[in-house]
Amino acid sequence: MKNFSVPAQAATAASAFPDLKPPEKPPEGRVGQGALSSRDKKRMRVRAQREAARQRGSIRASALSFANMHCYGELLHDYFQARKEVFIDQLEWDIPQADGMEFDQYDTPQCRWVIVHEYGEVLAGIRLQPTTARCGIYSYMLRDAQRGLLENLTDDVLFMEAPVDPRVWEAARVFITQTVSAKRRFEVQQILVSKLIQTARDEGASHVIGIVPAIWKRWLRRLDLSAVPIGPRFRVDGTHSQAILFNLFKAMN
């Protein structure tokens, strides 16, 4: 495949690499002639926690891994089902599936799956993977595209050589399900991106790269984020996309 000519943006892209008030303490009371029993204190504590949760809203964001997925019941299974519904049923991508779930060669123990959910229903998700990842002949999506290993992505997807750096992680399979109403979509986007940033930082990352829809500038602006393009616009599976990079320590501080 013919290589994409490197524009002046490449230099800019290359240079980009290098915080609820606590519930009030319940007043001391009396049970008969004594202080509150331990059972009553526990009930008051649980009631206060439930009220705090109600005030925060019912949407949650979790970062799952092979090490902690057992703590979340069927959430990871439901996440892969949601991916299948979005990318295969809705967008009609020609990608692997089995038992009603979508997956690929990058869903390994090296990943972190950021999942936004509500009462067990998956609302949105992102897969995070270090650019140092290895599994057989594969590394991570953007680098493997550049190496010519992926049929559905061009090898000129980046302006520069794909990084291999523990401080740089790749975000892929970004989605919000159709069950999210238009008026809640921005809230879900905020929660998803905030958890992505927190998770990547916790893993020692300073930058995230990934492929996003070509209208990325519009929705990143709404989220008060900034990024630089690190590749040309391209069309895949009917969608115009582009590779971008953003600095985690300039995001949502």
Image (spheres, helix red, strand yellow):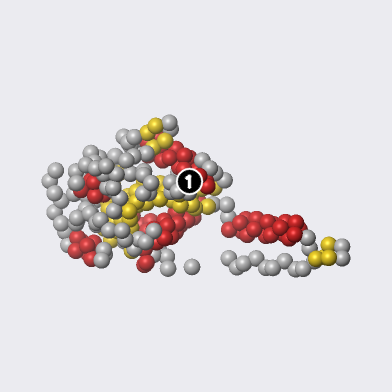
- Identity, as a three-letter code, of the amino acid under mark 1: Met
Say if residue 152 shows up in the picture.
Answer: yes
Q: Which residue is mark 1?
A: 69
- Quadrant holding the N terminus: top left
* Side of 103 where 14 appears, left or right: left
The picture places residue 117, in percent across and down from the top left corner, at 51, 48
- Quadrant holding the C terminus: bottom left
* Mark 1 surroundings within 10 Å by alpha-carbon count, few (fewer than 14), some (14 through 19), many (20 or more): some
Total marks shown come to 1
The picture places residue 106, in percent across and down from the top left corner, at 33, 44
Q: Note whether 241 is above or below 42 in the view shown.
A: above
Q: Judge by depth and name the residue closer to the eye, 98 or 211.
A: 98
Residue at the top extreme, as displayed: 99
* Side of 223 where 142 appears, left or right: left
Say if residue 82 shows up in the picture.
Answer: no
The picture places residue 7, in percent across and down from the top left corner, at 16, 59
Q: Judge by depth and name the residue closer to the eye, 192 or 201.
A: 201
Q: Quadrant of residue 13?
A: bottom left
Q: Judge by depth and name the residue closer to the eye, 233 or 183.
A: 233
Tell me the element at label 1: helix
Q: Write the residue at 29% across / 39% down.
A: 237
The picture places residue 94, in percent across and down from the top left corner, at 31, 34
Q: Write the residue at 78% across / 60% down.
A: 37
Q: Write the residue at 38% across / 46% down.
A: 109
